[in-house]
Image (spheres, helix red, strand yellow):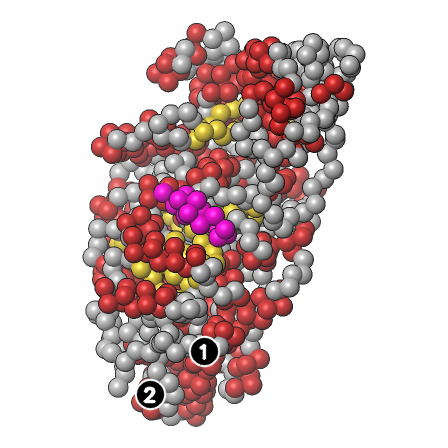
Amino acid sequence: MQAARAPAAGVPGSSPALDQTIQFLLSPVPECPPSCLGQVAGIAPGMPLQPPAQSSGPSTTLPPQVQSHSRFPAAPQRMQSTPAPQQAPPAPAQAHNNFETDDELDEVDFDFDEEINNRLAQLAPELITQLAPQRRAAIEAESDGTKDLQWGKQFPWSDEVMRLNRQFFGIGTFRLSQRQAINATLAGNDCFVMMPTGGGKSLCYQLPAIVQGGLTLVISPLVSLIQDQVFHLQEAGINSGYLSGSVSWEEQRGMMDSLRQTPPGIKVLFVTPEKVAASDNLMRMLDTLYQREELNRIAIDEAHCVSQWGHDFRPDYKKLGQLKRRYPHVPVLALTATATPRVQHDVVQQLSLRDCITFKSSFNRPNLRYEVRKKENKFDKSIACMADTIIEKFTGQGGRVQCGIVYCLSRENCEKVASELQKALRSRTGRHNLRINAYHAQMPVEEREKTQYDWTHDKVQIIAATIAFGMGINKSDVRFVMHFSMPKSLEGYHQETGRAGRDNKLASCILYYNYGDAVRTRHMLKQSAQENHTPPDQLQCNMDSLNAMMAYCEEEVECRRVMILTHFGETSFASVQCRGTCDLCVRNQSKSFEKRDMTTAAQDAVKVARVCGHQSSMSHVVDVFRGANSAAVRNKGHDRLQEHGLGSHLSKADAARLLRQLLVQRVLIEDTFRRDNEYGNVGSRVLVHEPSARRIAAGDLRIELPFALSAKAAREREGGNGGGRRSTGGRSSRSTQEDPIEASQEDEAAPAQEIIEIEDDAEDELPQEERIARQVSRTALQQLNLMLEARRNSTRAILEATVIEALVRARPVSEPQLEALQVSKFSANTRASYGSHILDALNQAKAFLDKLRSGEVTSPDEFQLDTDSMTSKWKRKVPSSFGGGPSSSQPPPAQRATQQPPTLTVQKPVIPGVQYDIV
């Protein structure tokens, strides 16, 4: 029997055996009979429950007797890194060290069970707080595929992945985490993929779909987004289709017939979550494919919609957890561009993902500039300020306004902003053909499609839209995103601003804010909750999200980029790395700051979090810390706590800054848990990391925050009066230069001069002949795009803007030159289908330029593509946008990926108001 030892610092009366018991209870393993707990803990009757002098923390390894016991089946095999060796658990008493049979296990006397249970009841809250950081870190370390180097290594399919990537998508490289996520899902693992808007999430399921046989099911929230993806997959030569309420019965029946083929005639099938919830036929078909082992993968796009913590929660998404339970051996790929740590946790739980591997790309967008401006109280003044900003920052030579989006909160706002802003800009620029259109969900489908088409083809310069606009739109040259109304959450704000600058060129994100907008939004949330019978926890979640958005808007000191990244769990980014790419860092460069020692206030904040944080959110802890007397504080009895109001001397903004700093320093941890209520939803709580808290209490860890100095104090400091305990911590050009950031650092926000300049400005500096050559070639390819779209009865461009610009610069005139051109999203299938027409258009442009030089024509604007000759040379019918799949005669499996989509007889254009010069 082990000798008794002195209790370790921290949790009184704890022991490694007790820690191991708690860890076992908290671990997601099959249920164990209560009589097993003593054996798990390795404690014999009468053993003291006291720890050794030194403890490295609870071990996650169960004793060998339990690991090998038949009641604990082995976990499913999956490809993963070799886990780091763990410290062996303390040896149990010799008398109970080995069990050969269940009978022997059952015969062991566990009279001390009651003693353990009593001790658990006494110590549970503090033990959970103590163990949560280690357990959370262990789980994250095991599942973080971004840090697991094996997923970037060579796999048996790697060469084929690279070949097909070039052939079908025209891409020769991968973005951050793409290769790793593709390898993990091809290896059969459940994955959670989080990449920023424009980060290439769709490739993570599109490419595996053609590498492997069978069907990939993709669940996506918006039909317009689905249609766009189906169009591009069909263009790349990949059979795909979609099922929704807008698809006719005949088309649905055709797709079902294709799915019944062996192998399935469709490689990628898109559906909405509502379709999954409502269609028994679809589920029966998936059952059949699963039984035939031809349901290869399930991809859930916009996966944050699963979580009630997400900014766009949808009940039908929550029902998707049935898919993993119904098809347990099918790997699931959950993808999103915006998810806080608690949303990530909830998504994995709700979807029932097993041994999920997470791949995260940084949320930092270095080419975006963030700014919050005061919004005028009167509408006309707000519009005037917005128009002046657009003229000043986003208008090129000749008054041409660059491409942008203005987000509004309501339909009425969209229409009014579009109308009045258009008038203001026309009067200021003198360009009466300038167009600003509204876009919102109440518009007819045809009108929305027409608006989106005109904007993507530069016929409309600015869209005034609700959040319904922008998802999945591949328009890369958006130079600005403005918010006329404050978004409801930082998640929504980050997703909406992410639609700017997808070409990696400089773009601006400007938010117009006043407190009245926040009040109106709060009222809307409450009213909506009453009408829709929203659970109280979900309403509180929405309010917390709104509070975080308000804190972002009202901040006067902290770097905005730091605030955004910290909100999404990225705590390694420092304000010095912003390098003047947000308004506060620019504004505060000319101000003097001092770093104040906030250690005493931090100690008080830790006390508050310790007594109420384990059952409360961060915003609630801030309220208790400041001494708020709100209903939420009173209902929990926290107004009667001795610690209530310890931070009353701080403003709410400064108190929130202090607690955010404690999160960054890992003194506090924002954790998630599932509530024991009828909804089974996830809650948020603030836990204290006791080792770090002890360092603060002992004075070994100091907490400092920057505060702006008054003009008088700044002058006194500059006059040599700064030798006190407070040290300057301001942002200045000099301090930034003295602390250079290496250019290779991924998280860094590059300074403005390092960003690629806006294309129009760069092209203005070219020789006149080259500018005219590009103008005519661009016109030729744009007119070709219109012709191809009309032949396909489609509103979607065959050649994306980035492809057109690459062709304009290179201007190939022969097939070898075209083949040698390496351009992303210019696939081998697109070259084979339309290469001759591209060369024809560019050669027509070249011939026109010769006439321009000789004087036969006098203006570049006279160019018109000769579509008659091109129509006569058409070599094949153009594939339809939404084919249901191939015919019944299937090619050999090796040829299925390259099989051409079905054909469609050419029809007249369907977009009203668009004129085509076509015979």
Can residue 644 be spotted in the picture? yes
Name which quarter of the figure residue 864 lies in: bottom left
The residue carrying mark 1 is 891
Q: Which label was assigned to residue 426?
A: none
Which residue is at a point 61% across and 35% down the rendered structure image?
Answer: 70
Which residue is at a point 74% across and 30% down the rendered structure image?
Answer: 88
Query: Which residues are the magenta region?
Result: 319-335
Q: Amino acid at mark 1?
A: Pro
- Could you say which is closer to the camera, residue 235 or residue 680? 680
Q: Quadrant of the C terminus?
A: bottom left
Q: Residue 839 lies in magenta, yes or no?
A: no
Which residue is at a point 66% across and 35% down the rendered structure image?
Answer: 68
**Picture coordinates of residue 315 (x, y %)?**
33, 41
Q: Quadrant of the N terminus?
A: top right
In this rendering, position of residue 445 left or right of residue 13: left
The residue carrying mark 2 is 871
Q: Is residue 513 above or below residue 414?
A: above
Which residue is at a point 48% across and 52% down the rendered structure image?
Answer: 330
- Which is nearer the N-term, disc 2 or disc 1? 2
Q: Is residue 659 above or below residue 899?
A: above
Identify the secondary structure beneath mark 1: loop
In this rendering, position of residue 100 left or right of residue 515: right
Number of residues whose C-alpha sits closer than 10 Å to that of mark 1, classed few (under 14), some (14–19) or many (20 or more): few
Q: CA distance from mark 2 to mark 1?
A: 30 Å
- Could you say which is closer to the camera, residue 357 or residue 865? 357
